[in-house]
């Protein structure tokens, strides 16, 4: 006996099975939706598809600035590295001898500590593009020779974010501009992650993962990667300024910064790491407020403790102004006669009055970081690594004859061209970076430093209070009169 099954029933069954499989795999959108965004550069409805535009095009994007642009970056295919430390020597045990032939105390055994690191996983995709729409222009009045005066993508940024978009972005090349948008998104995403990355924010199934940022790595939370035993010898120096205002001198921020520098410098000298290269990182507003008060405190430190002293009587205004201006121009702090380089960083979290009661309107609070870049004259101790897709992933691509996957930027970014939906196409990209801090005992952080700038600078990250943009993301194409339009209106 045979049973005939209708084509409609088969189609319904297959559709249900496909839906269940995609839901289980977490891949509900394996190809473009068929609804392009309309965010084209030229042609009807293009954001620059307006007749008669001048040639020079100016970008107002505020580029993110910070440590991520100066850290070294190198590829790796090791997922769980183990970094060994000789963490100290235990106390001697036994008793001192009584007789001349008695046993002596036994020297304390060597102790060790192992540390590890983990990659994050971040991905972004381009807008959806209709291929046959690319390259169109509205009419002969639309110019295609627009020239960017200033690059919106920070392509000259060093380290992990050195995205290699060939040449000045060509506004005729819609696909290229889609990749530029992805590059901007990655820069906005990763700059704060250097500090704020936290694996506690990882997604349940591994699609999104954050690497541990400096807010975690610079801390008093070091444990052996195998046994979980604490390793105090690797603890960083953490000082809480407890929302003190930088220009109140009670407590004195210059004293806090100076003693952190002295403590870390002592560790470096006595642990035989010299010469060590540090940078101090902080928010731009904090740097200007700090350098405003630094000369007064630096030039009068403890002078007021002598009998009959008058506050500030030893300060020469010209010397103070010169010190302040030199530190600002050179981006450094003068500590014990040495210039400690400063990197202003947009990625450092900044609190406002909504976050803490101690912060009044017009005030902010953030942290100051001491970061050891190199030791012993050039050995890198703080740097970034990324999964090098040019080594591992591309072997699989070659073996499987996949023609839709490729890497860029020395293996930093892995790209995939989604299966097209007819002429609608889209690309997706990911990066798996991490930050390595090999000498946390040479790093430090002063937390909760409060400051009151007259004006806050612009911020590069959408959603932040001082971010600015504007204008449309797409335009409506011009409606022309025609015989067919007139016929439709009858």
Image (cartoon, rainbow, N blue to C red):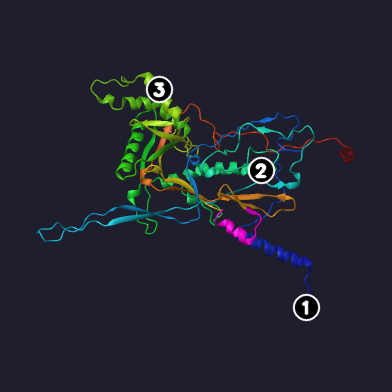
Disc 1 is placed on an element classified as loop
* Residue 202 position within the rendered picture, expressed as x and y whole percent measured from the top left: 51, 52
Q: Is residue 360 visible?
A: no
Q: Of the residues tagged 2 and 1, which is closer to the observer?
A: 2
- Image coordinates for residue 379, horizontal then vertical, percent: 40, 45
398 is higher (above) or lower (below) than 312? below
Q: How crowded is mark 1: few (under 14 residues within 10 Å), some or many (20 or more)?
A: few
Question: Outermost residue toward the front?
Answer: 377
Residue of label 2: 176
Query: Which quadrant of the rendered structure holds the N terminus?
Result: bottom right
Is disc 1 in contact with disc 3, using a CB cutoff of under 8 Å? no
| Pointer 1 residue | 2
Q: What stretch is highlighted in magenta?
A: 390-405
Cα distance between the residues tagged 1 and 3: 98 Å
Left or right? Give the position of 391 relative to 273: right
Vertical placement of 176 versus 77: above or below? above
In primary-sequence order, the first of circles 2 and 1 is: 1
Q: Indicate the quadrant where residue 257 lies.
A: top left
* Farthest residue, direction bottom: 1
Q: Distance between the residues labelled 3 and 2?
A: 47 Å
């Amino acid at each position: 006996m045979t049973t005939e099954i209708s084509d409609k029933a088969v189609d319904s069954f297959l559709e249900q099975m496909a839906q269940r499989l995609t839901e289980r795999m977490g891949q509900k959108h394996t190809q473009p939706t068929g609804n392009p965004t309309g965010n084209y550069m030229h042609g009807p409805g293009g954001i620059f598809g307006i007749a008669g535009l001048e040639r020079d095009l100016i970008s107002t994007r505020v580029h993110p600035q910070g440590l991520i642009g100066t850290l070294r970056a190198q590829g790796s295919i090791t997922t769980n590295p183990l970094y060994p430390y000789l963490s100290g020597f235990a106390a001697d045990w036994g008793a001192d001898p009584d007789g001349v032939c008695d046993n002596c105390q036994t020297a304390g055994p060597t102790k060790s500590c192992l540390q590890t690191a983990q990659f994050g996983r971040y991905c972004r995709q381009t807008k959806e593009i209709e291929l046959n729409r690319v390259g169109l222009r509205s009419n002969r009045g639309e110019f295609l020779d627009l020239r960017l005066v200033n690059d919106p993508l920070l392509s000259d940024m060093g380290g992990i974010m050195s995205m290699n978009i060939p040449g000045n972005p060509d506004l005729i090349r819609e696909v290229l501009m889609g990749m530029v948008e992805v590059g901007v998104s990655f820069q906005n995403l990763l700059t704060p992650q250097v500090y704020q990355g936290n694996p506690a924010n990882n997604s349940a199934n591994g699609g999104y993962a954050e690497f541990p940022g400096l807010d975690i790595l610079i801390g008093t939370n070091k444990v052996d990667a195998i046994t979980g035993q604490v390793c105090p010898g690797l603890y960083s120096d953490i000082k809480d300024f407890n929302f003190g205002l930088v220009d109140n001198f009670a407590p004195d921020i210059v004293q806090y910064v100076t003693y952190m520098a002295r403590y870390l410098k002592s560790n470096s000298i006595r642990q035989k790491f010299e010469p060590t290269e540090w940078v101090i990182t902080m928010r731009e507003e904090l740097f200007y407020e700090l350098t405003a008060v630094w000369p007064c405190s630096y030039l009068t430190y403890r002078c007021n403790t002598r009998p009959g002293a008058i506050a500030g009587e030893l300060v020469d205004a010209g010397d103070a102004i010169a010190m302040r201006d030199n530190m600002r121009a050179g981006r450094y702090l003068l500590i014990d006669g040495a210039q400690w380089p400063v990197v202003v960083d947009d990625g450092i979290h900044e609190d406002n009055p909504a976050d803490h009661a101690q912060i009044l309107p017009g005030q902010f609070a953030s942290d100051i970081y001491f970061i050891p870049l190199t030791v012993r004259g050039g050995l890198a101790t703080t740097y970034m690594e990324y999964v090098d897709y040019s080594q591992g992933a591309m072997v699989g691509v070659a073996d499987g004859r996949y023609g839709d996957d490729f890497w860029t930027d020395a293996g930093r970014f892995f790209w995939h061209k989604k299966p097209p939906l007819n002429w609608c196409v889209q690309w997706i990209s990911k990066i798996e970076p991490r930050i390595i801090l090999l000498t946390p005992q040479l790093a430090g952080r002063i937390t909760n430093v409060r400051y009151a700038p007259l004006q806050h600078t612009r911020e590069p990250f959408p959603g932040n209070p001082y971010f600015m943009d504007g204008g449309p993301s797409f335009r409506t194409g011009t409606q022309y009169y025609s015989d067919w339009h007139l016929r439709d209106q009858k």
